[in-house]
Amino acid sequence: MIKLLLNILNKEFTLVLKDIHALLVLFIMPMAFILVMSLALPDTASNIDKDRPKIGLIFQQPEDSQLPASQALTKLAGFHTQKYNNEKELRENIINDQLIAMIVVPENFIQLLQKNEPIDNNLGIYYSPSTPSQLRFLLMASVRQVTALWQLEKKLKSKVSDSFMQQGLKDKFLGVSLVSEHEISISDDKVEAKQPSSVQQSVPAWLIFSMFFVVIPLSTTFIVEKQHGTLQRLKTMPIKDGYFIFGKIIPYIIINLIQTLLMFLVGMYLVPAAGGQALQLSANAWLLIPMSMSISILAISLAMLIAVRVNTTDQATTIGGVTNLLLAAVGGVMVPTYVMPEVMKNISGFSPMNWGLEGFLTILLREGSFTDILPEMMKLLSLSAVCLFFAVTSYKHLLRD
């Protein structure tokens, strides 16, 4: 039986290698998509500065803008601040939605504040009508913190002469040393830590997409066997159907594992060589193997189900192609789920491509363990079992006809 299985595998590999065009689709297509999308998609982390809301700043007394204390207004956390000399120009930019707000500092405002003298004109914040309320609250809180800092610095200078002591007391009053930032890892809690970069999104997404395109070479070899009478000859042989099914699965699992290796190498070396961000793998990278195999088994099972139900390669290409496109569009391959509205996010959870993508992102982005990717793997393998069951049933009916 082992010799028979080896002969079946040899037959399948021979048929697969003859269809060179289909193999090129499996390898060239995802490579091109990964390169293009990794370079085209903006990275969230690298565009934080570009996406910061812009505010204008004007000092009614120009000399005030040269004071050291005034520099705090030009570096408000979370905002891009630009100085203006002409208040009319500043208002025009707000009206044209180029700025979300402007800050007007009255004459001698900083000096009077630091001296604890009466202030006739308050510092003014003027918002664009389209400025969201959340940004208004954030800007107001930031400006209030700056004004409080001015008052605090003046009091500290009058009571403490040492500059290091002043900084220490200032940090203590502002709570700088009392607050620390942390990122939640999936190993600590089931919370998504961050969004994937363009290369972290593109490599697994288009790899999964290409894996499901095994329907083209698999269905082609299957239809060739039907047309050449191979299936009819198989009826006369005392061989279990499982051997033929198993013989078709093994070659394509190997092909998909080669795809996985090559596409991750593309992300690690070819994308940065083309000017993009390199894909970084952590110590849990070995989990990519079982995750890839789970996706591969489902892709092959679905492809086999389609192959045994169609009669021509055109039918297989059409049905398989449309199915893959729909699963990819819904599953977060073509459009990342983090930019989808809530309704579409819920729908994407029904796509098996989304299960595979989430499994990959759990490994690459959240440094998850085998236990963390197990739910996605179980869903993939369960659906594989269903597809294989119907594929084998259809195959047996085909042999009896």
Image: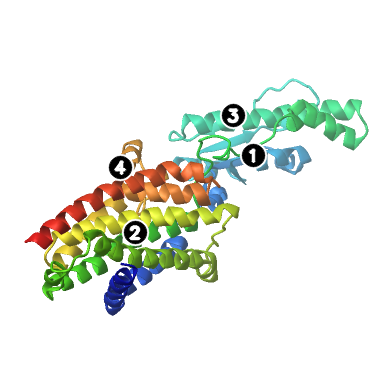
Mark 3 or mark 1, which is nearer the start of the sequence? 1
| Badge 3 density bin: few <14, some 14–19, many ≥20, Cα 10 Å | few
Question: How far apart, in angstroms, are the residues tagged by discs 1 and 3?
Answer: 11 Å
The image quadrant where one finds the N terminus is: bottom left
Q: Is residue 358 above or below residue 321?
A: above
Question: How far apart, in angstroms, are the residues tagged by discs 1 and 4?
Answer: 43 Å
User: Which residue is identified by label 2?
Assistant: 209
**Which residue appears at 56% of the width and 52% of the height?**
284
Mark 4 or mark 2, which is nearer the start of the sequence? 2
- Residue 338: x percent and y percent? 42, 44
User: Which residue is identified by label 1?
Assistant: 76
Q: Secondary structure at mark 2?
A: helix
Question: How far apart, in angstroms, are the residues tagged by discs 2 and 3?
Answer: 47 Å
The extreme right residue here reads 161
Three-letter code, disc 4: Phe
Question: How far apart, in angstroms, are the residues tagged by discs 2 and 4?
Answer: 16 Å
- Residue 328: x percent and y percent? 31, 53
The label shown at residue 350 is 4
- State the residue in front, 386 or 354: 386
**Which residue appears at 22% of the width and 64% of the height?**
239
Horizontally, residue 159 falls left or right of residue 320, namely right
